Image: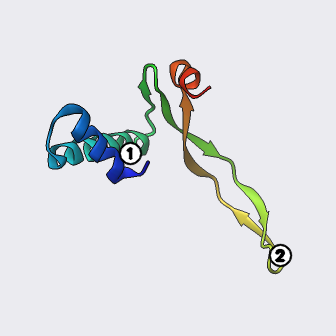
Amino acid sequence: MNKSELIDKLACDRGVTKAHAKAAVESIFENIAEALARKESVRLVGFGTFGVRERAARMARNPRTGKSIPLPKTNVPFFKPGKELKEKVN
């Protein structure tokens, strides 16, 4: 399912227009992204937790040349599924 299919499904399930469903989905995504940018976690009970982890600086290798390249530390988003979501998938 992609974003537009999610919007269509939400509009159908809740009996709202696609414009309202699109605004709701985009608002949710935007708010999650803004919280992660502030390095806050977003916990959705029964669904999961979105968060940010710091990846340490490291040395990588260019596969084309074999040369070592230093990579700086960086922040990466992660998602940890909740218990109820895991049970639905299994």
Camera-side residue of 81 and 52: 81
Q: Give the position of the C terminus as an image quadrant.
A: top right
Camera-side residue of 15 and 87: 15
Judged left or right of residue 43, residue 5 is: left
Write down the quadrant of residue 42 in the picture: top left
Quick one: label 1, few (<14), some, or many (20+) residues within 10 Å? Answer: some
Q: Among all residues in the image, which is located at the extreme bottom? A: 65
Residue at screen point 23% across, 39% down: 12
Query: Which of pointers 1 and 2 indicates the residue nearer the eye?
Result: 1
Quick one: label 2, few (<14), some, or many (20+) residues within 10 Å? Answer: few
**Image: 77 above or below 57:** above
Measure the alpha-carbon separation of dots 1 and 2.
35 Å
Residue wearing tag 1 = 33
Q: Position of residue 20 (x, y in %)?
A: 15, 44
Judged left or right of residue 15, residue 88 is: right
Residue wearing tag 2 = 67
Camera-side residue of 17 and 33: 17
Residue at screen point 77% across, 63% down: 60
Judged left or right of residue 61, residue 73 is: left
Q: Position of residue 44 (x, y in %)?
A: 41, 25
SS state under label 2 = loop
Residue at screen point 21% across, 32% down: 14
Q: Earlier in the sequence, mark 1 or mark 2?
A: 1
Count all numbered tags in the image, as a single digit: 2
Q: Among all residues in the image, which is located at the extreme right? A: 66
Colouring method of the image: rainbow
The three-letter code of the residue at mark 2 reads Lys
Q: Position of residue 11 (x, y in %)?
A: 22, 41
SS state under label 1 = helix
